[in-house]
Image: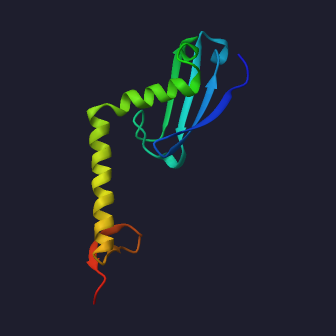
């Protein structure tokens, strides 16, 4: 057991911080903490944070903490659930882009939440 190894990677436009603890708490397990900056959704967690406890040596067998996390992300990104989420996100981006280009702007309540669209023309 020693000090954690902290690194940062970029995956599909999301910056991700990785903290790797070798034999955490003097146990036979390694610990990975994975946190997407700004709590961005990533395929291994909807909250932007994930903690893995793994048998000692698994991370090294995959080429280190960064390679292990890339493998997990890429594997989960192939799931149907993640593909649907990405497609829905793209559709919303297209909707907002098209609305902007068409001269519409979002209506906001006093709390700042979007409630719909209105024409920018009067």
Residue 23: percent from left, percent from top: 64, 14
Q: Nearest the camera: 110 or 21?
A: 21
- Residue 110 found in image quarter: bottom left
- Residue depicted at 66% across the width and 17% down the height: 25
- Residue 76 found in image quarter: top left
- Residue depicted at 52% across the width and 49% down the height: 38
Q: Is residue 37 above or below residue 119?
A: above
Residue 33: percent from left, percent from top: 56, 30
Which residue sits furthest bottom? 122
Residue 103: percent from left, percent from top: 30, 78
Q: How many numbered discs sit on the rendered protein?
A: 0
Left or right: where does residue 29 sit relative to residue 102?
Answer: right
- Residue depicted at 32% across the width and 65% down the height: 96
| Quarter containing the C terminus | bottom left
| Quarter containing the N terminus | top right
Q: Is residue 117 above or below residue 77?
A: below
Residue 28: percent from left, percent from top: 60, 9
Left or right: where does residue 121 sit relative to residue 40?
Answer: left
- Which colour style is shown? rainbow
- Residue 107 found in image quarter: bottom left
- Residue depicted at 42% across the width and 36% down the height: 45
């Amino acid at each position: 057991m020693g000090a954690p190894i902290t690194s940062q990677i970029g995956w599909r436009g999301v910056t991700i911080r990785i903290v790797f603890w070798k034999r955490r708490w003097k146990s036979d397990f390694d610990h990975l903490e994975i946190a997407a900056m700004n709590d961005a959704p990533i395929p291994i967690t909807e909250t932007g944070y994930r903690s893995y406890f793994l048998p000692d040596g698994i991370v090294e067998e995959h080429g280190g903490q960064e390679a292990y996390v890339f493998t997990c992300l890429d594997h989960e990104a192939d799931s149907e659930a993640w593909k649907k989420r990405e497609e829905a996100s793209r559709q919303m981006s297209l909707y907002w882009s098209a609305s902007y280009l068409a001269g519409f702007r979002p209506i906001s309540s006093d709390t700042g939440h979007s409630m719909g669209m209105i024409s920018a023309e009067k």
